[in-house]
Image: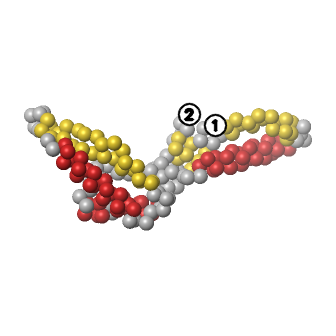
Amino acid sequence: LDLKGGYTRLNNKIENIKKIINNSELDSVEIIIKPISINDIYDKDGITNNKKLMQEVLITSKSINKIEELSTNPSMFIENNIIFEFSNIAYYYSRLDDLKKELLGKAIINAKERAYEILTATNHKVGDLRTARSGVFQITEPLSTEVAGYGLYSTTTKKKNIKVTVSADFDID
């Protein structure tokens, strides 16, 4: 069991990954190197006969198309004897907090418009907003019907649907 040699080979592969990523012209790239994990490898009799060293590398970038290209065409990595055991892309929206605020504002306007439509038939008018409450955000892939009481944030697709329920109480004039 040559752990020292394994560490050296793994470090060389990590450096090669960094070079490949840095040469890939990715915008706002960040490379996160996770700690090394060591797993026993067993023979057919259940006896440990070797060790497997693995290290997770996370790459973040705003260059979505280039990240997709790297993940679906890993030839540059394979040429450097870098093997992906598990890899998937997670898509995040970088201005989500701003979008949430905007959606909540639009939801209150929509609530007031609905209250106006309801009160029109009664010759009353919508008064001041008394209280407003927001539910959790459900950020899902398109066509999803999934909801959760704690909210959702699907990262599996670039396109997303975002929903939130707002309860608003208005004075009636």
- SS of the residue under disc 2: loop
Closer to the camera in the image, 133 or 119:
133
| Residue 141: % across, % down | 51, 50
Q: Which residue is mark 1?
A: 135
Closer to the camera in the image, 103 or 112:
103
- Res. 126 image quadrant: top right
Q: Quadrant of the C terminus?
A: top right
Examine the rendering and report whether any part of residue 14 can be seen.
Answer: yes
Compute the Cα span from label 1 to label 2: 9 Å
Q: Which residue is mark 2?
A: 149
Instruction: Please give left or right for residue 64 compared with residue 83 in the image.
Output: right
* Amino acid type, residue under disc 1 in the picture: Gly
Instruction: Please give left or right for residue 15 compared with residue 143 in the image.
Output: left
Q: Which mark identifies residue 16?
A: none
* Amino acid type, residue under disc 2 in the picture: Gly
| Residue 118: % across, % down | 80, 41
